[in-house]
Structures are given as structure tokens and as C-alpha cells.
């Protein structure tokens, strides 16, 4: 079965077809329920999937990225590739120069290797504060998180209330597997970060990301010097976060649509 928007001559299997259709319905529902909603893109695989699903269909969800000042050149290059492919300029949010300068002067440029607290403070300055600015005037945001990515995301819900910012939060890929993500990317010929081909399934700031080893989970290369239960930057952690009922979505089976 061919899927609209897929690569020329691409055939999409029934299971992926159903997954794609449900994703599209979810994104349409989010945009319909929230007049102001943004998608936070890391420019990695899951987020390029969502970027394609949003921009190729003209869904009214803005796309932005956090330019931390420590990203790989390959990651920054994805902004140009999105512009070339979709004619869309991803909005970039940068950390405050004074906060970065104060941190570096007091602790050193790479002090995040010294302790979890210093690492989290760096993430606070370069990621969390810019994210808060990006979301200051929206009622909802979208992420590319998946349950399968790490132990810290095993209980991830499709829809949550972001207690830290008092807005809705959606994780439409929560139940997608890594294989399904890559099946989609190939089927729709979506641009992907070249670092993925070099063993980086999860991509963050350059000094805090390495390629993973065989058998490691997809986020093992993030802050690899820390224990598994501390590996979040603060973007997805906040007080009073609670799950909300899943969005009801009715998908007509492929067989019935063809009849």
C-alpha cells in the first residue's frame, strides 16, 4: 500500500501504514485542541520523523530547536536540510550569554564532567532556560520521546500535563519502536543526521554524547560517565507532572479502506 508523501515508488506495510495514520490523527488533534503549540526538535531521528509529519502536511505546530552552543556541526547542518526540503526555517533558541559566561568563569568550560550537579547546571543554562522561553506563550508542546529509549522514560505517557510549565505535553511517538522510526524515515525519505550512521542513536551536545557500543540502550551515549537513573537534562522533568487520558483515535483498518 502506497502512502501519500512517501518516497517515489515506496511501499508501506499495513502495520506502518496504521501507525502513520494514527500519528497524523494525533498531530491534527493536538493542533485542533491548542491554538498555540510548539514542537521541540533535537534534529535527531525521532524528531526528524515528527518534523516531516508536521511540515509535509502543513500541521499548525511550530518547530523550534535549542541551539546550546555546544552542538555537533552535523546537527546544526540539519537546520539547513530542513529549510531545503520543506522551505521552513526552524526557530532557534540560544542560552543567555551572561549565564554561560558566569558558569564558565566560575567552574570552567567542561565542568559538567566533574559532578552531576555541575552537569545539570550546565543543562539548565543551555537547555532548560531557553526551553522555558520557547514555551512561555504556548498552551502545549510536543516531543519525540519514546518509552523504549531508556529506563527514565519507561513510563512515558502519550499525553501529560507539564506541571513545571502548567501546559499540556504530548509524546506522540511514546509507543514507537526504534525499528518503526527508521522504517518511517526510509519510507518517506526523511533527511537524517549523519551522526546516526556513526553509532549515535541519541544526539545531544558534542562533549556529552558518544557513539554507543553493541548491546547498549539508545541513550547510553548521553552523559555516559553518569549512572543510568540520572540521564535526563531537565527538559522533561518537573513537579506535579501527571498523565492524562490518551487521545481517542479511530483508525479504519487497511482492509476495510480498500473495500
Image (cartoon, rainbow, N blue to C red):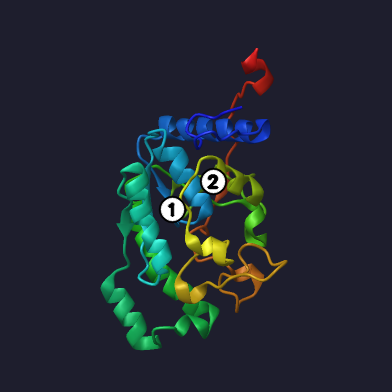
Image location (x, y in percent) of residue 196: 54, 61
**Residue extending furthest top?**
259
How dense is the environment of label 2, judged by Cα within 10 Å: few (below 14), some, or many (20 and up)? Answer: many
Q: Is residue 152 visible?
A: yes
In the rendered view, does 33 fall on the left or right side of 93? Answer: right
Real-space Cα distance between discs 1 and 2? 15 Å
Image location (x, y in percent) of residue 167: 44, 45
Relative height, residue 60 to residue 238 (above, below)? above
Relative height, residue 124 to residue 236 (above, below)? below
Residue under the point 67% across and 63% down:
217
Residue highlighted by disc 2: 185
Residue under the point 57% across and 28% down:
2
How dense is the environment of label 1, judged by Cα within 10 Å: few (below 14), some, or many (20 and up)? Answer: many
Dot placed on the residue nearer the N-terminal end, 1 or 2: 1
Image location (x, y in percent) of residue 10: 56, 35
Residue 178 vs residue 198, the one in the foreground: 198
Residue highlighted by disc 1: 41
Disc 1 secondary structure class: loop
Disc 2 secondary structure class: helix
Residue 213 vs residue 85, the one in the foreground: 85
Q: How many marks?
A: 2
Relative height, residue 88 to residue 249 (above, below)? below
Contact, CB < 8 Å: mark 1 with mark 2?
no
Amino acid at each position: 500500500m502506497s502512502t501519500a508523501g512517501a518516497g517515489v515508488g515506496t511501499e508501506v506495510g499495513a502495520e506502518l501504514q496504521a501507525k502513520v495514520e494514527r500519528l497524523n490523527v494525533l498531530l491534527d488533534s493536538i493542533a485542533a485542541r491548542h491554538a498555540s503549540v510548539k514542537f521541540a526538535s533535537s534534529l535527531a531521528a525521532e524528531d526528524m520523523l515528527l518534523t516531516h509529519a508536521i511540515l509535509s502536511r502543513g500541521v499548525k505546530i511550530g518547530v523550534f530547536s535549542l541551539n546550546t552552543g555546544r552542538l555537533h556541526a552535523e546537527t546544526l547542518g540539519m537546520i539547513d536540510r530542513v529549510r531545503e526540503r520543506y522551505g521552513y526555517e526552524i526557530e532557534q533558541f540560544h542560552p543567555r550569554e551572561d549565564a554561560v559566561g558566569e558558569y564558565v568563569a566560575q567552574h570552567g568550560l567542561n565542568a559538567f564532567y566533574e559532578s552531576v550537579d555541575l552537569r545539570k547546571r550546565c543543562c539548565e543554562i543551555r537547555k532548560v532556560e531557553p526551553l522555558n522561553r520557547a514555551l512561555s506563550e504556548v498552551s502545549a508542546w510536543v516531543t519525540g520521546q519514546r518509552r523504549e529509549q531508556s529506563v527514565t522514560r519507561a513510563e512515558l505517557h502519550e499525553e501529560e500535563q507539564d506541571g513545571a510549565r502548567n501546559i499540556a505535553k504530548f509524546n506522540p511517538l511514546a509507543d514507537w519502536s526504534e525499528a518503526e522510526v527508521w522504517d518511517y524515515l526510509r519510507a518517506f525519505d526523511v533527511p537524517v543526521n549523519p551522526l546516526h550512521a556513526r553509532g549515535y542513536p541519541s544526539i545531544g551536545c558534542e562533549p556529552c554524547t558518544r557513539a554507543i557500543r553493541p548491546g547498549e540502550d539508545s541513550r547510553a551515549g548521553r552523559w555516559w560517565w553518569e549512572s543510568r537513573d540520572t540521564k535526563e537534562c531537565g527538559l522533561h522533568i518537573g513537579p506535579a507532572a501527571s498523565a492524562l487520558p490518551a487521545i481517542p483515535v479511530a483508525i479504519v483498518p487497511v482492509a476495510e479502506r480498500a473495500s
